[in-house]
Amino acid sequence: MARLVVTVHTADVPDDGEWAEYVAGANAYLPLEDQRVLVVSAGGGPNGKQRKMIVDVLNGAIVPVAIITNSWLMRGSGIAVSWFNPSLKVLGPGTLDTAIEYLGLTTWERVESARILKELQQGLGLDVARLLALRRWPGFRHTAAPGPEGKGARSP
């Protein structure tokens, strides 16, 4: 799918082999800067070693990434990677529209992202639709990674 990369994480850390394959394919089709990455996590995400692999592949590239998760751990992982990629934004449940707007997806990419999310959800046995539908949960606040101007955003 052209410039859009859609990733769904289960509640577990990805297997090192799967992660290595994912990272190896990261810039196989387009330069990293031209890609838009949508991540939905049921709590799992890359461990420290795997995050370093992503940072190494980025090699200073600024890639728009939107992570939707209800996990504080995944939120922290995303924020750690955003130190090296300031265009990474971590969002809470119920923010798919915000993520799509942030990534600047075309109408076709919006439709395809929904189809792919559903397909990945079924393949992994997850209820991603529930995570995407929730608007908030008690005590959650998110802080966006600083944008190009160095300004972050905070919302209740």
Image (spheres, rainbow, N blue to C red):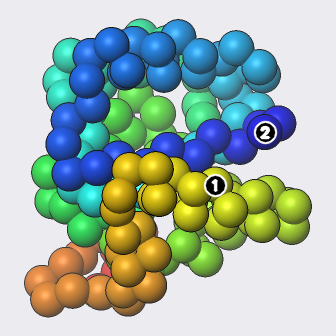
Q: Amino acid at mark 1?
A: Ile
Relative placement, left or right, of 42 versus 123 is left
- How far apart marks 1 and 2 lie (CA) works out to 10 Å
Taking the spot 65% from the left edge, 66% from the top edge, the residue there is 114
Give coordinates of residue 120: x percent, y percent.
Answer: 51, 51
Residue 54 seen in the figure: yes
Above/below status of 56 relative to 63: above
Relative placement, left or right, of 150 versus 45 is right
Give coordinates of residue 103: x percent, y percent.
Answer: 67, 56
Quarter in which the N terminus is drawn: top right
Taking the spot 82% from the left edge, 36% from the top edge, the residue there is 2
The residue that disc 2 covers is 1
The residue that disc 1 covers is 116
Give coordinates of residue 117: x percent, y percent.
Answer: 56, 59
Secondary element under disc 2, as helix, strand or loop, is loop
Residue 150 seen in the figure: no
Taking the spot 30% from the left edge, 87% from the top edge, the residue there is 136
